[in-house]
Amino acid sequence: MIMERLTAEERLTLKTGAFGAVFLVSNAEPGMLAMVRESIAASGAFGAASGVVKEALTTGPLPELPRDSELEIEATVLPALSRSMAILRAKSPGDVEMYRSVVLAAADQVAQAHRGVSSGEATVLDRIRAALAEPA
């Protein structure tokens, strides 16, 4: 149930977190062919979203993510994931678990898409899980 409509900025935050999580995992094991497989894997997971989460992930502009360093990407993406969870808890609590599961499924599918999960990808997945965790 939608309690309160998300603003364009809030939808972009959800999209930045979700797309950024996929980008982080993809960056952990670079390679052009791998990136194509990973993009396809992620789009399937995002397509499974519904409600507010689907609207946020499928409408509006694509997020602009830094490309210079992994640290810059993480510094953008991980806070966006945490903010997304806070936004959903405040405005659409019924969608919190949907967002978490869609982002984790997409990130995991990306990691699995090319020769299984590497140690670098596993580390990034752990950071994504932590950013999506309930606050203590």
Image (cartoon, grey):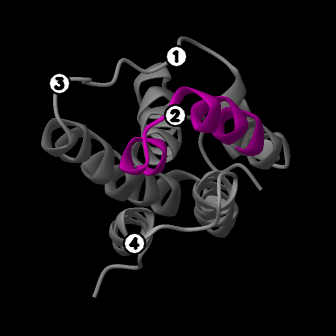
Give the CA distance from mark 1 to mark 3: 18 Å
Q: State whether residue 134 is above or below residue 22.
A: below
Give the CA distance from mark 3 to mark 2: 20 Å
Q: Badges 2 and 4: C-beta atoms under 8 Å apart?
A: no
Give the CA distance from mark 4 to mark 1: 29 Å
Does dot 1 land on a helix, a strand or a loop? loop
Residue at 34% from the left image edge and 58% from the top image edge = 82
Q: Badges 1 and 2: C-beta atoms under 8 Å apart?
A: yes
* Front residue (pair 88, 130): 130
The three-letter amino acid code for the residue at tag 1 is Leu
47 vs 61, left or right, is right
Q: Residue 62 carries which label?
A: 1
**Camera-nearest label, 1 or 3:** 3
Residue at 46% from the left image edge and 48% from the top image edge = 21
Tell me where the magenta segment starts and ends, as one range.
25-41
| Residue 86 drawn at (x, y percent) | 39, 59
Which residue is under mark 3? 68
Residue 30 shown in magenta: yes
72 vs 66, left or right, is left
Q: Residue 119 carries which label?
A: 4
Q: State whether residue 11 is above or below residue 119.
A: above
**Rendered-image quadrant of the C terminus:** bottom left
The mark nearer the N terminus, 1 or 3, is 1
**Camera-nearest label, 3 or 4:** 4
Which residue is under mark 2? 15
Residue at 75% from the left image edge and 44% from the top image edge = 41
The three-letter amino acid code for the residue at tag 4 is Ser
Question: Quick one: label 2, few (<14), some, or many (20+) residues within 10 Å?
Answer: many
